[in-house]
Image: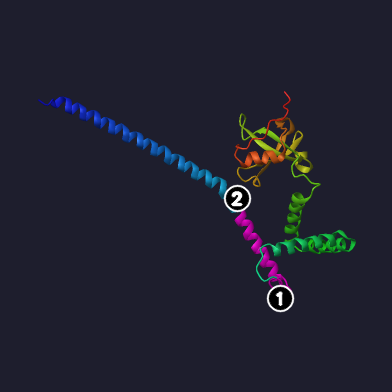
Amino acid sequence: MVDRKAIIERAKKINEIKRKRLEKEKEVFMQLGAKLRAYLFTGILVTAPVAITFYLAYKFILWVDGLVNEILPPQYQLDNYFSMSIPGIGLIVLILFLMLVGMFAAGFLGRFFIRLGEWFVAKVPLISSVYSLLKQIFETVFSSKTQAFKKVVMLEYPRKGIWILGLVSADLHGEVEAKLPEPMINVFIPTTPNPTSGFLIFVPKKDVIELEMSVEEAIKFIVSGGLVEPKIKNIKS
């Protein structure tokens, strides 16, 4: 006589084994899917910045080539000298032109014309303000003798107990200093992830802590949102 109870128990065990096997296979596929998604996002993070950078550089080079080709007279255009379009030729021509302008500006005659042009621009309303601002920005960025920021500091902002990184540009002078009760410094507070934007605050010298990290290291630290942390140097206790 067939034992129905034993058959039912055996069927239950078989179903339980199948269920566990399906759950295990499902878990394996879910882990595989998670790994593939992680690989995909990692690939995007690695390749996207490089690809976008090269794409923008390529577009910029083509834009410069087209601009230089339009500026040149028809008989001197680059297309007349090359059987095929070579990206970057216009950029090379522009760089050589700027070098020649720099050589001319370094001479006595060049300095005379530059001073004459600046004097003329200074007499024109509105344009003089724009020119002065742009000149200061370019001198700050390109001049090797000028450092936009002296050092990196930590200070409590916007309230006690919360610390933030700041870049010291200079000691405070002039009318603002005269109105304040103690020696202050100018501190630029950059924002994440765009450190070119931020705000300027005046802070008492005694309320800041100077850091050993360089300005470049601080900028990387801020841009990365704290992910790229500067290497620890000799810390004075």
In the rendered image, is residue 4 in sight?
yes
Which residue, as the protein is rendered here, is positioned at the far bottom? Answer: 75
* Residue 18 placement, left or right of 199: left
User: Magenta segment range?
Assistant: 53-81
The structure residue drawn at horizontal position 17% and vertical position 28%, both measured from the top left corner, is: 7
User: Residue 104's image quarter?
Assistant: bottom right
Q: Earlier in the sequence, mark 1 or mark 2?
A: 2
User: Residue 160's image quarter?
Assistant: top right
Q: On the image, numbered disc 1 is attached to which residue?
A: 74
In depth, the one of 13 and 46 nearer the eye is 13
Which residue, as the protein is rendered here, is positioned at the far front? Answer: 1
The structure residue drawn at horizontal position 44% and vertical position 40%, both measured from the top left corner, is: 34
Q: Which element is circle 2 on? A: helix
User: Residue 180's image quarter?
Assistant: top right
Image coords of residue 134 (percent x, y): 73, 56
Residue type of the residue flagged with mark 2: Val
Q: Is residue 75 above or below residue 132?
A: below
